[in-house]
Amino acid sequence: MTSPDVSHVSSRDNPLLKDLRKLAHDPGAYRRLGRLWLEGDHLCRAALERGVRPAIAVFSETYWLQGRVQWSGAAVKTIVIDDALLAAVSALESPAPMGFVLDLPESPTLSPNAPTVILDRLQDAGNVGSILRSASAFGFTQVVALKGTAALWAPKVLRAGMGAHFGLRLIEGAEIDVLGILAMPLVATSSHHGEWLHQTRLPNPCAWLMGHEGQGVSTALAALATKHVRIAQPGGEESLNVAAAAAICLHASAATAVL
Protein backbone atom coordinates (compact mmCIF):
# COMPACT_ATOMS: atom_id res chain seq x y z
CA MET A 1 0.00 0.00 0.00
CA THR A 2 1.14 3.53 -0.70
CA SER A 3 1.50 6.25 1.91
CA PRO A 4 -1.91 7.84 2.46
CA ASP A 5 -2.88 11.40 1.77
CA VAL A 6 -4.24 12.21 5.26
CA SER A 7 -6.38 15.26 6.02
CA HIS A 8 -8.09 16.26 9.27
CA VAL A 9 -11.62 17.66 9.62
CA SER A 10 -12.82 19.51 12.71
CA SER A 11 -15.72 21.61 11.39
CA ARG A 12 -19.29 20.30 11.16
CA ASP A 13 -19.76 22.51 8.08
CA ASN A 14 -17.15 20.61 6.09
CA PRO A 15 -18.62 19.66 2.65
CA LEU A 16 -17.63 16.01 3.07
CA LEU A 17 -19.53 15.77 6.35
CA LYS A 18 -22.60 17.27 4.72
CA ASP A 19 -22.42 14.66 1.96
CA LEU A 20 -21.91 11.83 4.45
CA ARG A 21 -25.01 12.89 6.38
CA LYS A 22 -27.03 12.76 3.18
CA LEU A 23 -25.61 9.39 2.17
CA ALA A 24 -26.24 7.93 5.64
CA HIS A 25 -29.84 9.09 5.99
CA ASP A 26 -31.33 9.48 2.50
CA PRO A 27 -31.91 6.20 0.59
CA GLY A 28 -31.71 7.98 -2.77
CA ALA A 29 -28.79 10.30 -2.09
CA TYR A 30 -26.27 7.96 -3.69
CA ARG A 31 -27.92 8.48 -7.07
CA ARG A 32 -27.66 12.27 -6.83
CA LEU A 33 -24.13 12.32 -5.44
CA GLY A 34 -22.74 9.37 -7.39
CA ARG A 35 -21.16 7.98 -4.25
CA LEU A 36 -21.73 5.34 -1.58
CA TRP A 37 -21.06 5.45 2.14
CA LEU A 38 -19.99 2.17 3.75
CA GLU A 39 -20.10 2.46 7.51
CA GLY A 40 -18.20 0.02 9.70
CA ASP A 41 -15.18 -2.21 9.27
CA HIS A 42 -17.15 -5.30 8.13
CA LEU A 43 -18.55 -3.63 5.02
CA CYS A 44 -15.24 -1.92 4.36
CA ARG A 45 -13.29 -5.18 4.56
CA ALA A 46 -15.86 -6.90 2.34
CA ALA A 47 -15.31 -4.23 -0.30
CA LEU A 48 -11.53 -4.56 -0.13
CA GLU A 49 -11.74 -8.36 -0.38
CA ARG A 50 -13.70 -7.95 -3.64
CA GLY A 51 -11.01 -5.70 -5.07
CA VAL A 52 -12.82 -2.41 -4.51
CA ARG A 53 -10.57 0.59 -3.86
CA PRO A 54 -12.42 3.36 -2.02
CA ALA A 55 -12.04 6.99 -3.02
CA ILE A 56 -11.90 8.09 0.62
CA ALA A 57 -11.34 6.27 3.91
CA VAL A 58 -12.87 8.06 6.90
CA PHE A 59 -11.82 7.49 10.50
CA SER A 60 -12.55 9.00 13.88
CA GLU A 61 -9.48 10.53 15.50
CA THR A 62 -9.38 7.90 18.24
CA TYR A 63 -9.80 4.97 15.87
CA TRP A 64 -7.17 6.29 13.45
CA LEU A 65 -4.61 6.44 16.25
CA GLN A 66 -5.30 2.77 17.00
CA GLY A 67 -5.70 1.45 13.48
CA ARG A 68 -3.53 3.58 11.24
CA VAL A 69 -1.07 0.76 10.58
CA GLN A 70 -3.65 -1.73 9.27
CA TRP A 71 -5.70 0.84 7.35
CA SER A 72 -2.95 3.09 6.04
CA GLY A 73 -3.15 3.38 2.26
CA ALA A 74 -6.44 1.47 1.96
CA ALA A 75 -7.95 4.37 0.04
CA VAL A 76 -6.83 7.02 -2.39
CA LYS A 77 -7.35 9.59 0.35
CA THR A 78 -7.73 9.34 4.14
CA ILE A 79 -9.82 11.74 6.21
CA VAL A 80 -9.59 11.84 10.00
CA ILE A 81 -12.60 13.43 11.72
CA ASP A 82 -13.30 14.54 15.27
CA ASP A 83 -14.98 11.63 17.10
CA ALA A 84 -18.19 13.46 17.94
CA LEU A 85 -18.55 14.90 14.43
CA LEU A 86 -18.23 11.49 12.78
CA ALA A 87 -20.67 9.94 15.25
CA ALA A 88 -23.21 12.64 14.40
CA VAL A 89 -23.13 11.59 10.75
CA SER A 90 -24.33 8.07 11.46
CA ALA A 91 -27.89 6.74 11.18
CA LEU A 92 -26.98 3.81 13.46
CA GLU A 93 -27.78 3.51 17.16
CA SER A 94 -24.14 2.63 17.72
CA PRO A 95 -22.13 4.70 15.21
CA ALA A 96 -19.06 3.06 13.70
CA PRO A 97 -15.70 4.81 14.01
CA MET A 98 -14.79 4.36 10.35
CA GLY A 99 -16.18 4.06 6.85
CA PHE A 100 -15.40 4.21 3.14
CA VAL A 101 -16.67 6.53 0.43
CA LEU A 102 -16.91 4.72 -2.91
CA ASP A 103 -17.71 5.95 -6.36
CA LEU A 104 -21.07 4.52 -7.39
CA PRO A 105 -20.41 1.61 -9.78
CA GLU A 106 -21.75 1.92 -13.30
CA SER A 107 -24.93 -0.06 -13.85
CA PRO A 108 -24.10 -3.22 -15.81
CA THR A 109 -26.09 -4.49 -18.77
CA LEU A 110 -28.36 -7.46 -18.22
CA SER A 111 -26.52 -10.73 -18.80
CA PRO A 112 -28.76 -13.28 -20.59
CA ASN A 113 -27.00 -16.31 -19.09
CA ALA A 114 -26.30 -15.31 -15.50
CA PRO A 115 -28.35 -17.10 -12.79
CA THR A 116 -30.69 -14.32 -11.74
CA VAL A 117 -32.99 -13.12 -8.97
CA ILE A 118 -35.70 -10.68 -10.00
CA LEU A 119 -37.18 -8.42 -7.32
CA ASP A 120 -40.71 -7.21 -8.01
CA ARG A 121 -41.58 -4.08 -6.00
CA LEU A 122 -40.04 -5.23 -2.71
CA GLN A 123 -40.30 -2.39 -0.22
CA ASP A 124 -38.36 -3.43 2.86
CA ALA A 125 -34.65 -2.61 2.73
CA GLY A 126 -33.82 -5.44 5.12
CA ASN A 127 -35.56 -7.97 2.91
CA VAL A 128 -33.79 -6.71 -0.20
CA GLY A 129 -30.37 -6.80 1.43
CA SER A 130 -30.98 -10.26 2.85
CA ILE A 131 -31.99 -11.58 -0.59
CA LEU A 132 -28.82 -10.13 -2.11
CA ARG A 133 -26.83 -11.97 0.53
CA SER A 134 -28.63 -15.25 -0.22
CA ALA A 135 -28.17 -14.74 -3.96
CA SER A 136 -24.42 -14.37 -3.51
CA ALA A 137 -24.22 -17.35 -1.16
CA PHE A 138 -26.09 -19.71 -3.49
CA GLY A 139 -24.45 -18.80 -6.79
CA PHE A 140 -26.96 -16.35 -8.27
CA THR A 141 -24.69 -13.70 -9.73
CA GLN A 142 -27.24 -11.21 -11.05
CA VAL A 143 -30.06 -9.35 -9.30
CA VAL A 144 -32.59 -7.29 -11.23
CA ALA A 145 -34.71 -4.82 -9.28
CA LEU A 146 -37.85 -3.89 -11.16
CA LYS A 147 -39.24 -0.37 -10.81
CA GLY A 148 -40.83 0.15 -7.43
CA THR A 149 -38.25 -1.95 -5.57
CA ALA A 150 -36.23 -0.41 -2.73
CA ALA A 151 -32.97 1.22 -3.88
CA LEU A 152 -30.31 -1.50 -4.02
CA TRP A 153 -27.46 0.74 -2.86
CA ALA A 154 -29.39 2.47 -0.07
CA PRO A 155 -27.65 2.44 3.33
CA LYS A 156 -30.01 -0.07 4.99
CA VAL A 157 -29.79 -2.42 2.00
CA LEU A 158 -25.99 -2.19 2.04
CA ARG A 159 -25.90 -3.08 5.73
CA ALA A 160 -28.32 -5.99 5.32
CA GLY A 161 -26.34 -7.26 2.32
CA MET A 162 -23.22 -7.62 4.47
CA GLY A 163 -20.89 -7.12 1.50
CA ALA A 164 -22.80 -9.25 -1.04
CA HIS A 165 -23.25 -6.20 -3.28
CA PHE A 166 -19.64 -6.31 -4.40
CA GLY A 167 -19.91 -9.79 -5.90
CA LEU A 168 -23.15 -9.28 -7.84
CA ARG A 169 -24.34 -7.69 -11.08
CA LEU A 170 -26.96 -5.25 -9.78
CA ILE A 171 -29.49 -3.70 -12.13
CA GLU A 172 -31.94 -1.14 -10.76
CA GLY A 173 -35.17 0.39 -12.02
CA ALA A 174 -35.71 -2.22 -14.72
CA GLU A 175 -38.91 -2.65 -16.72
CA ILE A 176 -40.48 -6.08 -17.15
CA ASP A 177 -39.81 -5.93 -20.90
CA VAL A 178 -36.03 -6.27 -20.44
CA LEU A 179 -36.45 -9.74 -18.95
CA GLY A 180 -37.14 -11.11 -22.42
CA ILE A 181 -33.41 -11.41 -23.10
CA LEU A 182 -32.88 -13.89 -20.26
CA ALA A 183 -31.95 -17.23 -21.81
CA MET A 184 -33.37 -19.34 -18.99
CA PRO A 185 -36.72 -20.28 -17.45
CA LEU A 186 -38.38 -17.92 -14.98
CA VAL A 187 -39.63 -19.51 -11.75
CA ALA A 188 -42.32 -17.69 -9.76
CA THR A 189 -42.96 -18.11 -6.04
CA SER A 190 -46.45 -18.16 -4.54
CA SER A 191 -48.03 -18.77 -1.15
CA HIS A 192 -51.14 -20.46 -2.51
CA HIS A 193 -50.56 -22.29 -5.79
CA GLY A 194 -47.93 -24.07 -7.84
CA GLU A 195 -45.85 -27.21 -7.46
CA TRP A 196 -44.39 -28.03 -4.06
CA LEU A 197 -40.77 -26.90 -4.00
CA HIS A 198 -39.53 -30.09 -2.35
CA GLN A 199 -41.21 -32.25 -5.01
CA THR A 200 -40.51 -30.34 -8.23
CA ARG A 201 -37.55 -30.53 -10.58
CA LEU A 202 -35.99 -27.09 -10.80
CA PRO A 203 -34.44 -25.84 -14.04
CA ASN A 204 -30.77 -24.99 -13.90
CA PRO A 205 -29.89 -22.24 -14.50
CA CYS A 206 -33.04 -20.24 -13.84
CA ALA A 207 -34.30 -16.83 -12.79
CA TRP A 208 -36.33 -16.64 -9.59
CA LEU A 209 -39.15 -14.10 -9.26
CA MET A 210 -39.58 -12.66 -5.76
CA GLY A 211 -42.63 -10.47 -5.26
CA HIS A 212 -43.91 -7.62 -3.13
CA GLU A 213 -44.16 -8.38 0.61
CA GLY A 214 -47.94 -8.13 0.61
CA GLN A 215 -49.07 -8.60 -2.98
CA GLY A 216 -46.56 -11.15 -4.20
CA VAL A 217 -45.42 -11.42 -7.81
CA SER A 218 -47.47 -9.21 -10.12
CA THR A 219 -49.92 -10.81 -12.54
CA ALA A 220 -47.94 -9.52 -15.53
CA LEU A 221 -44.66 -10.91 -14.23
CA ALA A 222 -46.17 -14.23 -13.14
CA ALA A 223 -47.46 -14.69 -16.69
CA LEU A 224 -43.85 -14.86 -17.91
CA ALA A 225 -42.95 -17.74 -15.60
CA THR A 226 -42.61 -21.25 -16.94
CA LYS A 227 -42.89 -22.75 -13.46
CA HIS A 228 -44.73 -21.75 -10.27
CA VAL A 229 -43.71 -23.16 -6.89
CA ARG A 230 -44.75 -22.90 -3.27
CA ILE A 231 -43.02 -23.89 -0.06
CA ALA A 232 -44.59 -26.48 2.23
CA GLN A 233 -45.40 -25.04 5.66
CA PRO A 234 -46.53 -27.89 7.88
CA GLY A 235 -46.68 -25.56 10.85
CA GLY A 236 -49.69 -23.85 9.33
CA GLU A 237 -48.50 -20.29 8.72
CA GLU A 238 -50.22 -18.50 5.84
CA SER A 239 -47.00 -17.30 4.23
CA LEU A 240 -43.29 -16.77 4.74
CA ASN A 241 -41.31 -13.56 4.83
CA VAL A 242 -40.05 -12.98 1.28
CA ALA A 243 -36.39 -12.99 2.35
CA ALA A 244 -36.86 -16.33 4.12
CA ALA A 245 -38.70 -17.74 1.10
CA ALA A 246 -35.93 -16.53 -1.21
CA ALA A 247 -33.25 -18.22 0.90
CA ILE A 248 -35.13 -21.53 0.80
CA CYS A 249 -35.73 -21.35 -2.95
CA LEU A 250 -32.20 -20.29 -3.85
CA HIS A 251 -30.75 -23.01 -1.64
CA ALA A 252 -32.96 -25.55 -3.39
CA SER A 253 -31.58 -24.35 -6.74
CA ALA A 254 -28.02 -24.57 -5.48
CA ALA A 255 -28.63 -28.10 -4.24
CA THR A 256 -30.05 -29.05 -7.64
CA ALA A 257 -26.99 -27.64 -9.38
CA VAL A 258 -24.55 -29.84 -7.44
CA LEU A 259 -26.51 -33.11 -7.69
Image: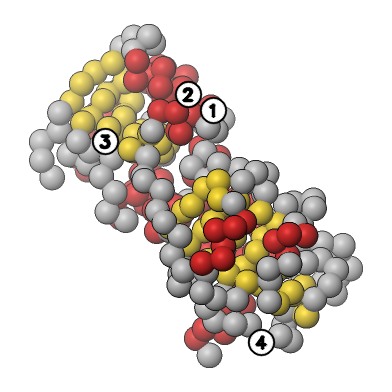
* Residue 241 shows up from this direction: no
Asked whether 196 or 174 is in front, the reply is 174
Task: Please determine whether, in this image, residue 47 is positioned above or below residue 188.
Answer: above
Up-down: is 249 above or below 211? Answer: below
Residue 68 x, y percent position in the rendering = 21, 35
Question: Which disc is residue 55 wearing?
Answer: 3
Q: Earlier in the sequence, mark 3 or mark 4?
A: 3
For label 3, the SS is loop
- Residue behind mark 2: 22
- Look at label 3 and name its amino acid: Ala
Which quadrant, please, contains the N terminus? Answer: top left
Report the residue marked by disc 1. Answer: 26
Q: Residue at x 55, y 58 (%)?
A: 178
Residue at left 70%, top 57%? 211
Judge from the rendering whether residue 55 lies leftward or rightward of residue 234; answer left or right: left
Return the residue at label 4: 201
- Residue depicted at x 31% and y 29%: 59
In terms of depth relative to the viewer, which is nearer, 179 or 216?
Answer: 179
Label 2 crowding class (10 Å Cα cut-off): few <14, some 14-19, many 20+?
A: some
Q: Determine whether label 4 and label 2 are within 8 Å by CB.
A: no
Of the image marks 4 and 1, the number of the one nearer the N terminus: 1
**Mark 4 and mark 1: span between their CA atoms?**
43 Å
Q: Residue 71's spot in the image, x, y percent? A: 23, 40
Q: Residues within 10 Å of mark 4 (few under 14, many from 20)?
A: few
Q: Residues within 10 Å of mark 1 (few under 14, many from 20)?
A: some
Residue type at mark 1: give it. Asp
